[in-house]
Amino acid sequence: MENRVVSAKELKAAKAKLQQGVVLSMRGISKSFPGTKALNDVDFTLRKGEIHALMGENGAGKSTLIKVLTGVYPKDEGQIFVDGVEGEAHIHSPQDAQNLGISTVYQEINLCPNLTVAENMFIGRTKNIRVHWRENEKKATEILNSLGIPAQANQELSRCSLAVQQMVAIARAVDMQCKVLILDEPTSSLDEKEVQMLFGLMRDLKNRGVGIIFVTHFLEQVYEVSDRITVLRNGELVGEFPISDLPQVELVARMMGKDLNDLADLEEIGQKKTAGEKVIYNAEKLSSAESKPFDFQIHEGEVNGFTGLLGSGRSESVRAIFGADRVTGGKVEVNGKKVNIAKPHDAMKAGIGYLPEDRKRDGIIADLSVRENIILALQVMKGFFHPMSRKEAESFADEYIKALKIKTASQDTPVGSLSGGNQQKVILARWLLNHPNYLILDEPTRGIDVGTKLEIQKLVLKLAAEENMSITFISSEIEEMLRTCSRLIVMRDRNIVGELTGDDLNQSSVMKTIAGGGQ
Amino acid sequence: MIQKTNSRKKHDLSQLIIPLAALGILIVFNLIRGIAIGDLGFFSITTRINNDGNMVLSGNLISIIDDASALAIIAMGMTLVTAACGGQDISVGAVGAISGAVFVKVLDAFGLDNISVLSIVVGLLAAIGVTIIFTLFNGTLVAVFKIQPMIATLILFSCGRSIAYMITGSATPQLNDKLINAIGKTIPGIPIPTPIFLVVIMALILGLVFKLTNLRLYTQTVGINQGAARLNGINPTAIKLLSFVLLGVCVSLASMIQVCRLNQLSHKTLLDAIEMDAILAVAIGGNSLGGGKFRLAGSILGSYIILMLTNTLNDMSVKPESIKAYKAIVIIIIVIAGSPAVKEKISAFWKKVHNSSRRAVAGR
């Protein structure tokens, strides 16, 4: 097997010119930003009708490579060859890429939600001033049908589910005669069923000969749908592998540039602490504008989790606990004392912290510095008339930048310019600095690299064990929750349908409970 | 992956580069023009004896800074509202007329020929109180009912001067009093116009508020991401309302200055069209009109730039009727120079220069 792994050098030699069946070849691509070499002599080859996963941790150079390919960034060195073009392809703008048949569907869908599906598919593509919408609608219906996308051409886009919106974006790309389709984290906000729908579409396109570049953080999905994997690390090419030659553990190891020690580490640190006797938080019939009434309690030093499919109500439940949505009823006791939590500030006063699911929308204050972002919650607790001194703020920021190994040029750097994983650490730091008794982490590991994911999981266990903190940990990856939580609350259709502890904490019983035992 | 290395200090200064450069260019332009026509009168500062027999400083630069006082104070309040709400209050001129009417009405109640420190203090406090009621009306529409600031404040923009008229009637009371002149012009014995001090005092007060409270942090947080601000225990509605309260204080003070400078109240012309200049001052000062990070110093500089520009054009004997057109051209240039698109291009250009010079060094 080992000999089938192609090294960077061999690849380069093999790609002197475009071979049969290759739609895209990037050779020796380098790109620098002030202070960093984002890409160093990277090769990438995409064949006709293949799904090619581009893997690497945050900062490995995936996005830069994609942006060079789509003309967003000019490359410093290297050549790009595209099927159907004599010699080197010149891509200086996204429009150039588009014209060469390279289409991208981004994580954040960039369509117009208030236009119809058909309008979205054809907008900006006609050269005539007069637009034949009726014809377009007919054409759109044909395309949607042929791709099996469950949407009406005359439907307003915002009325479609996120998955369908994503598929419409793909349909638009496909209809523009694309040869290379780039999907950048397409599944991060889809539930399992929607992911399957998307995969169906991807396989269909593959059979039609489209080459698909698939960028994702979900390892299982890579193995479910891809044919080949290219791994980048620190801006350099690690190698290109057929999927069958690279077991999942080895992929992780190559992405991290380590043997699997770190994973083993986690197994070791994975000694879950047994929860204390004392009830830290207790809610009876708690309900909010977004969640149905539920009972919940957590003990001192306990790590529990809410699990369930997207939309099952797990995030809504913890938002109700923190008072993030309008609380409509229920009795809440913190440390045995009755408290009224109507808004986040009440929860903070009761010693509760909350790391929200959507880091960009609800977490970071993008234009403010790392320091200001770290001290924010503590500063609010101190009160409007008690600003902390610059010195105090600096030492707090310094302490947590070191403790959580936050990678930032300085404390004064705007937090929005940090990578996703480091932004998440800044928000974690914000809450840890506030020393809550009960910390709610909603999807703390979403969209961040494997290394940081492990760090956060370790930290959760450490906080519970050493500081007796009670923690609610929510993740879409059930494995992460099984590793960290000693109790799992399973939700379906906005109701708590089960609670798993002890020996029941395994993948199959979680799946069964989520799916519903009787059916 | 892309570690941006710009530190906060650099970042902060960069916000002031455009206004400082604009001010510099205006000064240099006047200097060259002065040399060319052999008259540097634009820069001369002399002393003269005013009507009350006091020695005062006089000259172009003094009158520019003096004239800009009301604008600079309103621009400070406008900066806070802009930062917190991501929009502007276009009713400041009209509300200023109401404030002036209340101020004069109170003075009138004490007797216009019998103005005392007490009547002025009571008048100012009453004006501030009434003005805050009106700005809070705007603030409530914006913060509670989530109406776009420009639309919300359009209401008082159109009816504010009618309300001012209802307070004082059609009369334009004259205020010829030593105390009024001490506020609007100079205090006997001090050669610098009082309004200049009032700008400094207002800036110092706000600076002190920033020092003693979290107003700056909260305002910026709410302006950048109010959802996240709420999840961190900040009440965005309260912060927005507070910004309107502070704007009310600024408007009242500016209105009093202007009434005292002109020695009369005219509900039609008091602070006429100041809202546009105030918004411009905020923009020229490098503050984002979409809210978030802000610098008061930028807006104050912006006010002085606007006045210096008007003054320069006057000095070049541009007809008053066409001044606005010339002013518009220069302001377009300043605003475009400070726009994100141009900033991006400039930083890209510097990167290129930097890279090629590095390559040249490496090549040796």
Image: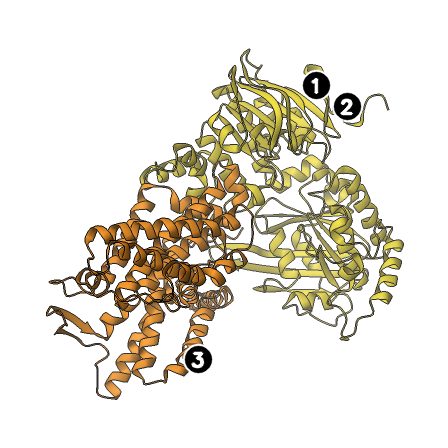
Are the residues tagged 2 and 1 within 8 Å (C-beta)?
Answer: yes
Q: Distance between the residues labelled 1 and 3?
A: 74 Å
Tell me: A411 left or right of B172: right
Q: Identify the residue under disc 1.
A: A500
Q: Residue furthest bottom?
A: B37
Please provide percent x and percent y for residue A73. 59, 62
Q: Which residue lies furthest to the top in this view?
A: A277
Q: Identify the residue under disc 3.
A: B325
Secondary structure under tag 2 reads helix
Q: Residue at x 30, y 49 (%)?
A: B125
Give the color of chain A as drawn.
yellow
Q: Identify the residue under disc 2.
A: A513
Amino acid type, label 2: Thr
- Which chain is rendered orange in the image? B
Which quadrant of the structure image shows residue B74?
Answer: bottom left
Identify the chain of the residue marked 2, using the numbered disc in the image: A
